[in-house]
Image: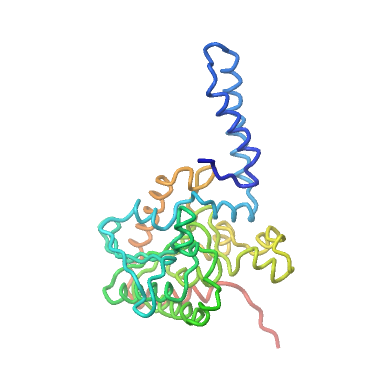
Amino acid sequence: MARFVMEFERPLADLEEKLAALANLDIASTPQLAAEIAELEREVERLRATLYSTLSPWEKVQVSRHPDRPKTVDYVAYLFDDVVELRGDRRFADDQAMYTALATLGGRRVVVIGHNKGHTTKENVARNFGSPHPEGFRKAERAMRLADRFGLPIVTFLDTAGASPGLEDEERGQAWAIADCLATLSAVRVPVVVVGIGEGGSGGALAIGFGDRLIMLEHAYYSVISPEMCALILHKDAARAPESAAALALTAEDLLRMGIADEVVPEPLGGAHREPETVAGEVGVRIATALDALSEEDSDGLLERRYERLRAIGEYNETD
């Protein structure tokens, strides 16, 4: 199957294809090829290091959308045991764009909530490409309330371009469903750890993306709006998305600098999809460490600091 190549990766992909072609030749009969292959391997490593150490915000957005990037269900499979998936919102339907489950992480029982993208086109269509409908957010809210009732920490995974924007979604109360999620998430008396693993677009991400700790993967993003929609609204031209991405300060590095994110998990050169198990293992360590620290706080203190955390985001000036 052909490898998916992002536009900025094209020079690197061309070199890798050339290297693969040379590697298939009979080196024994042409000894000079060995030196050429060794030099090309060094050139590939140099170019890969250069490309991924100087990614623009727009290029990071592209990496966050890579189809091979690990999804919520992958992290669940790598990190959690005794998983019991929870389905349905008890009102309308089971939205496959939102994943909820009871699970165990390192001996600690937790509730897992995450946007649910697929690995294939068929899966993505069934899951609406990870953009939840109102029933998806209501399913998430039901899981939050369950966690609060039984004193279980909540771990959420962000990976969505945004909430589903269709007319039927609005008719079924999309805005209210997102608002109810936020109200519930802000009031639960259990620790909430949020992990940005890919896209983090608009209210679709925010609905399950507010908690006591925010852990971001290096090439994940989190923003009030996607770059394309921002460009379309402000400039009437979606092609200016790269410009909007730079202005939105949406990268993990930006979020850490502004005090919104608490830590950033480094990714291997090329992105998390290059070494998914290694990245998942590090994510698991960060989640466990955060939960250990948060479990030492009493519920009242947890809620107070969560409120202060929200109030501390952003700056404003008052004038007469």
Q: Quadrant of residue 138?
A: bottom left
- x and y, in percent, of residue 118 in the image: 45, 57
Query: Residue at horizontal 31%, vertical 56%?
Result: 80
Reply above or below: 69 against 201: above
Instruction: Tell me: 127 left or right of 63.
Output: left
Q: Quadrant of residue 239?
A: bottom right
Query: Residue at horizontal 42%, vertical 72%?
Result: 136
- x and y, in percent, of residue 270 in the image: 54, 43
Q: Quadrant of the C terminus?
A: bottom right
- x and y, in percent, of residue 187 in the image: 39, 79
How many callouts does the rendering have?
A: 0
Reply above or below: 210 against 71: below
Front residue of 300 and 237: 237
Residue closest to the far front: 122
Query: Residue at horizontal 38%, vertical 60%?
Result: 290
Front residue of 229 and 153: 229
